[in-house]
Image: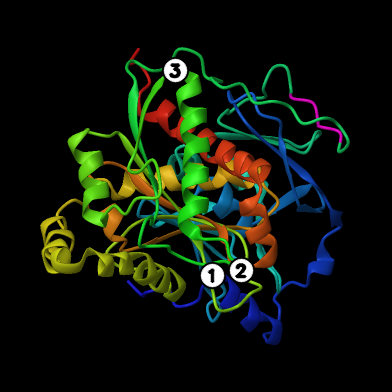
Amino acid sequence: MTTPIFASKAFRRFLILAPLIFPLSVFAEAAPISIAFAHTGNPPKIVSGYRLGSDYFLGADEMARLYGAQIYWRPVSKIVELSRSGRIVAFKANAAAASVSGHAVPLKSPIVWSASDAWIPVSFLESPAFADWSGTPAFFDQRKSLLTIGESKPLSPVIAPIHPKAAPVAKPQVPYGRIWVRKLRIVVDPGHGGKDPGARGIHGALEKDINLKAALELVRLLKKTGVFDVRLTRHDDTFVSLSKRSEIANKWKADLFVSLHSNAAQNPRDSGFETYFMSEKASDPHAQRLAEFENSSINYESKFRQQAEVQMLLGELSKTEYVNASSEFAGLVSRETSGEVNIPDKGVAQAGFYVLRGTHAPAILFEMGYLTNAKDEEDLRSESFRRRLMRGLYSGIVDYAKKINHPKK
């Protein structure tokens, strides 16, 4: 299998200079599409789509965010691939069919290739093959431009569009009713701490402080439901080794592990949140650099460093059964958080984070924003922003909890 070498941003820069198969002008008009997630009680999310004749199109980037998939671009062959839990759906420009896990699935309309994205016919999301790949049925009401994910028929009653000036709708704390057969155990890990400050913001904010404040907010939300048992790896400005963090989760037999971090970059324009899960091979150079930075906390473990490295690098390499579950968990968190905050969703990626490798449960590392970006740093210092950010993460946790702990019928 050929290793993908073009990430989305690089691909777009390439296509600015490359000839286009279909100019965007072939579209009849821009067509905002409402995205509703069945059974959550949340208002629809409005995304940008396009209409060509009677067909509606959704960008491949947006599809990747909605379904928690990784996206790969192959500009030479004009192919875009979405990968989820090791299964791939591929689209080729001007082809009459898509490939879902190696099987051809007819398209009502071919994808439209532009300099900014690849546009996929929304009708494809309703196909049984795509529902099998994504694990979620979908229904598109063309009259209302409403895509409902989680239902193969219209919702009743149909959720009304939200007026732009309407007051925000408060999310119920337990939107799914009595769905848990037992309390799920969740470990929330505020990254860094004590002598390990983590990243430093351009105006002086310390990552360790931001991470702890966000973690305390997430714990508050989770405990308020009454359906989760929650534990922190640190409650104050204390140094906790990477191996100790995963040890806390393992000894407590945690069902989920969430490690909170704040990012940094040389480019001050880099902005947004990212969701990571464990993989021995990083999905891209950016993910690799980030893992190296986060793993550098092991340098603070002094005389225990060699012992910790052996434990983390060798002793836990066999713990791969949680990778697919972590990927799905990360996708749900990314999807829900993108609807809560106005900073970019940089998607789901994977890399070899020590703190995730040692954890015997579905685990994610959540980068909340860039302290080296002036706006992100200001946002992360804001209590109201952190509350919205953690509300999105909380919703993703609830979505995943519903999947893994629903009583059997």
Q: Considering only order in the chain, which callout, 1 or 2, is on the residue closer to the N terminus?
A: 1
Q: Considering only order in the chain, which callout, 1 or 3, is on the residue closer to the N terminus?
A: 1
Using the image as rendered, state which of residue 39 and residue 353 is in the foreground: 353
Task: State the SS at label 1.
Answer: strand
Percent x, y of residue 147: 68, 37
Residues drawn in magenta: 159-163
Residue 130 visible: no
Vertical order, 384 against 100 (above or below) = above
Q: Considering only order in the chain, which callout, 3 or 2, is on the residue closer to the N terminus?
A: 2
Q: Amino acid at mark 2?
A: Ala
Task: State the SS at label 2.
Answer: loop
Residue 161, magenta (yes or no): yes
Using the image as rendered, state which of residue 7 and residue 299 is in the foreground: 299
Residue 9 visible: yes
Residue of label 1 = 79
Say left or right for 399 vs 252.
right
Check the picture and name the quadrant holding the N terminus. Answer: bottom left
Q: Residue at x 53, y 36 (%)?
A: 217
Q: Residue at x 57, y 51 (%)?
A: 65
Check the picture and name the quadrant holding the C terminus. Answer: top left
Q: Residue at x 82, y 52 (%)?
A: 53
Q: Tell me, what colour scheme is on the image?
A: rainbow
Residue 281, magenta (yes or no): no
How far apart marks 3 and 1 lie (CA) works out to 46 Å
Residue 226: give its label: 3
Q: Nearer the viewer, mark 3 or mark 1?
A: 3
Task: State the SS at label 3.
Answer: loop
Residue of label 2 = 93
For label 1, the crowd category at 10 Å Cα-Cα, with few meaning under 14, some 14 to 19 and many 20 or more, is some
Residue 286: give its label: none
Q: Amino acid at mark 1?
A: Ile
